[in-house]
Amino acid sequence: MGMMSEFKKFAMKGNVVDMAVGIVIGAAFGKIVSSFVNDILMPPIGMLIGGVDFSDLAFTLQEAVGEEAAVTINYGSFIQTALDFIIIAFAIFMVVKGMNRMKKKEEAKPAEPPKPTNEEVLLAEIRDLLKKD
């Protein structure tokens, strides 16, 4: 089997396509959550603590010297990124929880009893014939 046909077989498996769709949707969801945190959630929080823009919060370790930029620890950006992560993690948790609940409902359905094997059918027929006599 050639490399291209092997790759085509791999790429056309359902799991790979599902995973690719999940990654694309996850990336888009991440952008939505980042916008939600940066544009909707953080401005009112900043206003409540005194009109602070979180993206401006930083500790300056070294002031700018000539053409060199200042060295800062941008803890405001870190807070925004941490909130992004918490919201995304919670949303994923809720999706997984819902999927697990649906799986449990499927598992809770009683399974059909297994069909008797040919030997069991034959023995039942012999038993029934012996009862008639």
Image (spheres, grey):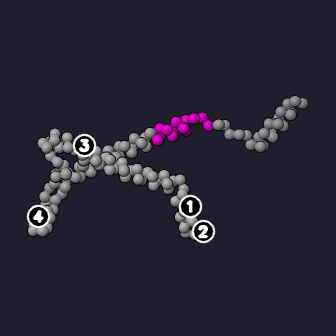
Q: Where 23 falls versus 127 (above or below)?
A: below
Q: Are marks 1 and 3 in contact (CB under 8 Å)?
A: no
Label 4, label 2: how far apart the Cα atoms are: 61 Å
The reply to whether the magenta stretch includes residue 104 is yes
Residues drawn in magenta:
99-111
**Which residue is denoted by mark 2 in the rendering?**
1
Which residue has dot 1 on it?
9
- Mark 1 residue element: helix
**In front: label 4 or label 3:** 3
Q: Residue at x 78, y 39 (%)?
A: 121
Q: Which residue is mark 3?
A: 40
Find out whether the residues at labels 2 and 1 contact each other: C-beta distance under 8 Å: yes
Mark 1 Cα-neighbour bin, 10 Å: few <14, some 14–19, many ≥20: few
Which three-letter amino acid code belongs to the residue tagged 2?
Met
Q: Secondary structure at mark 2?
A: loop
What residue is drawn where x is 57% and y is 65%?
Answer: 5
Helix, strand or loop at mark 3? helix
